[in-house]
Image (spheres, coloured by chain):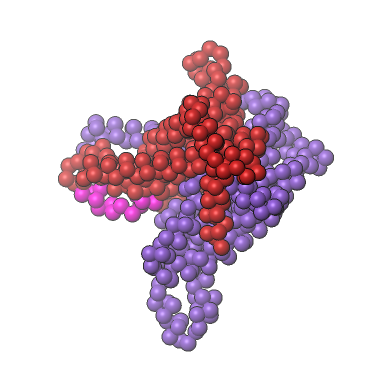
Chain colours: A purple, B red
Amino acid sequence: MARRRTASDVSHDIVIGGIALVGTVILIGPVLVVLITSLSTSQALKFPPPGFSFQWYEALFDTLQSRQIHIAASNSFTVALWATACATVLSVLAAVAIARVRSPSARALEATFMAPLILPALSYGLATLMFFSLLGYRPSLLLLTIGHLIVIAPFVFRTTLASLTQLEPSLLEGSASLGANRLYTFRRVTLPIIAPGIVAGAFLAFVNSLDNVPVSLFLTNARTDMLPIRMWGMIESTLDVRVAAISGLLIVFVFVLMVALDRLVGFTRRVGGD
Amino acid sequence: MYLIFFIAPFLLLLWISFHNDNELTQPGLDNWIKFLGDPFYVEVVFKTLRLGLLTVIATTILSYPIAVIYYESGVRIRKIMLFMIILPLLLSVVVRTFAWIAILSREGVANATLQGLGLTDGPISLLQTEFGLILSLMQIEMPLMLLPLIAVMQRIDPRMIEASRALGASRWRTTLQVLIPLSLPGWIAGATLVFASSTTAFISQSVIGGQRLIYLPAVIYQQSMVIYNWPFAAVASIMLLVSVLGGIFLIAAVGRWISREAS
């Protein structure tokens, strides 16, 4: 149906398009700025950079100069891997149990599992510190893992529950009527179908643990330094340009994983809620 | 198991806040009286709420047009847009905050652009201002607004839009009276996440806001990790929790009010 475009319609497209363009520049521009800054030859955060080099990346990989950063990075990755593994197992079991019973109490449980997404994580971080201190534990990687686990579990839970609700009940009935027991049905029917959802959620959880500040902030000490906290310290004290190099590596890391997972499990589609 | 680890710490926080000393031997209201009786701390609460609301408003203004463009685009453009929305979300908050320092500092992108365009003579200070902080929080929180918004918009039947246009409604009218009211549930979810996240964004607040702008998370950190006054830190944490919940209820009420007005 061809319609004549009125002046009002044109103004709509200009205003909406213009704001959207500004929004997109604000959204993605900073990522490019960090990448460019990380290749700068300057000691200061000068933009545009006077010249380009890999000196900050070289400084970052220098084992003597950047030992603290390496320790923090290795701590962060260790905690993120363990917390994600535990959170995935826990969340999948919870999602399967909750999806099966659609009673009010199950709904309440569902809300409880989502709560960490909304309640201030900082209050939670402080509470965990006090909780563990009163129990007599000192900050350690194990406590950090437990703290992260609670905060990141909702991500896996949500994507798993979403793929479970799309599961055809007739498939399970079919499997049961053919004589399969519940465990066999879960392993051979349910799990393969919900696996992409689990993987997408696990990736979100992993990234969130890696980036976590509110819990790490309170459970970090000299022995259990974490990457985001160390980076924060570097920004606050001397504005070390090595932070740009770490950021550059993290950007590439996340980008590559995101593209790979998008191919494998349709990651962006799952997060986008389509 | 999950309940124990998640709920217990909050109850503990409440319990600790009603003590006067770190050893928890003297129960009392001293720290509550100290917090609520001091105009400085009461102002911090209001400034935190204000920051959250301004961030929600700024994020809404930028997100809705992007969501509308997303809704009207084809599959390929949608995929690219979704990628651009999710990538920043997956980057560490520290990385994104650092990016804004590189942009807002005296020799940064913003000042270089402003001077290049001849809008300012010398470098202007954008760090340590509420404007600079809201600008950076806007970028940091925008994906949280956009994702629920486009998820809800995708479920709007395109025939509703076609019907509106066929009945002679202008593009403005269709967007304002059909698309926006129908996507309100997504806005409520997004605004809730943005508000909760921006009021507790300790790193961004402290690095970009600096010493001059103090918000509740900074009070919590100072009291617990620098001064070691745990009961007072617990009071501040509960105030943060209450503020966030208050903001969330306000957002839900506004959402309900708009949808009633629109129908």
- A108 or A9, nearer to the observer: A108
Q: Toward which corner of the image does residue B19 lie, by quadrant?
A: top right
Asked whether the viewer can see residue A84, the reply is: yes
| Depth order, front residue of A108/A32 | A108
Q: Nearer the viewer, residue A158 or B28?
A: B28
Front residue of this view, candidates A269 and A112: A112
Q: How many numbered circles does the render carry? A: 0
Asked if residue B180 lies left or right of residue A103, the reply is left
Q: Which residues are magenta?
A: B151-163
As drawn, the residue found furthest toward the bottom would be: A179
Q: Quadrant of the C terminus of chain A?
A: bottom left
Q: Is residue A256 visible?
A: no
Residue in the picture at 35% in, 35% down: A16
Q: Where B250 falls versus A256 (above or below)?
A: above
**Residue B208 falls left or right of residue B177:** right
Residue sitting at x 48%, y 69%: A96
> Considering only vertical position in the picture, is B88 above or below B211?
below
Find residue B105 and report its horizontal and vertical position in percent: 59, 24
A116 versus B63 height, above or below: below
Residue A239 on image: x %, y %: 68, 29
Residue A119, how many percent across, how many down? Answer: 49, 47
Residue at 69% over, 52% down:
A136
Q: Residue at x 59, y 39 (%)?
A: B20
Whether residue B103 is situated above or below residue A204 in the rendered picture: above
Q: Main secondary structure of the magenta part?
A: helix
**Residue A190, magenta (yes or no):** no
